[in-house]
Amino acid sequence: MLEEINIGGLFLTRLIGLRSSISEEDASEFFKCFKNVFLDRNQDHWYEHSPSKGQGYRCISTPGEGCPDPVLLMVTKKCKIRYCDLKLPLEVYLWIDPGEVSCRSGHCIIVSESLLSLIL
């Protein structure tokens, strides 16, 4: 669980680093807060033997319209960064599941890697 959360958090942090002007210190704090919030929120929604179970709950999204993702709102509040300063692209979906971290933008899959083949 921790490895998948680290990979997903690192992906989001790097995406933010490419698009926003937040400092390295703030990006590092975002990464730390993301790991803590995601772990706390998903302790009871992690099923090693049935990875698709609870998948919707573990999805982080930046919808084109509508409310920002509640996990990202909790993270930005906890690390005192404004959500709008993240400059996240619209329609990005990040699934952090047992054994796999996947990301989709619109209808295109950006990343879908098994943890066994993912090297950071």
Image (cartoon, rainbow, N blue to C red):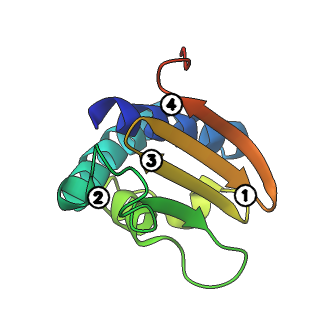
Distance between the Cα atoms at labels 2 and 3? 20 Å
Distance between the Cα atoms at labels 1 and 4? 19 Å
Circles 1, 4 touching at the beta carbon (< 8 Å): no
Q: Quadrant of the N terminus?
A: top left
Q: Amino acid at mark 3?
A: Ile
Rendered location of residue 72, percent (x, y):
44, 62
Rendered location of residue 101, percent (x, y):
51, 40
Circles 2, 3 touching at the beta carbon (< 8 Å): no
Residue 85 location, quadrant: bottom right
Distance between the Cα atoms at labels 1 and 3? 18 Å
Judging by the rendered image, the residue that carries numbered circle 1 is 89
Badge 4 local density, few (<14 within 10 Å), some, or many (20+)?
few
Judging by the rendered image, the residue that carries numbered circle 3 is 96
Badge 2 local density, few (<14 within 10 Å), some, or many (20+)?
some
Circles 2, 1 touching at the beta carbon (< 8 Å): no
Instruction: Classify 61 as above or below 48.
Output: below
Judging by the rendered image, the residue that carries numbered circle 2 is 78
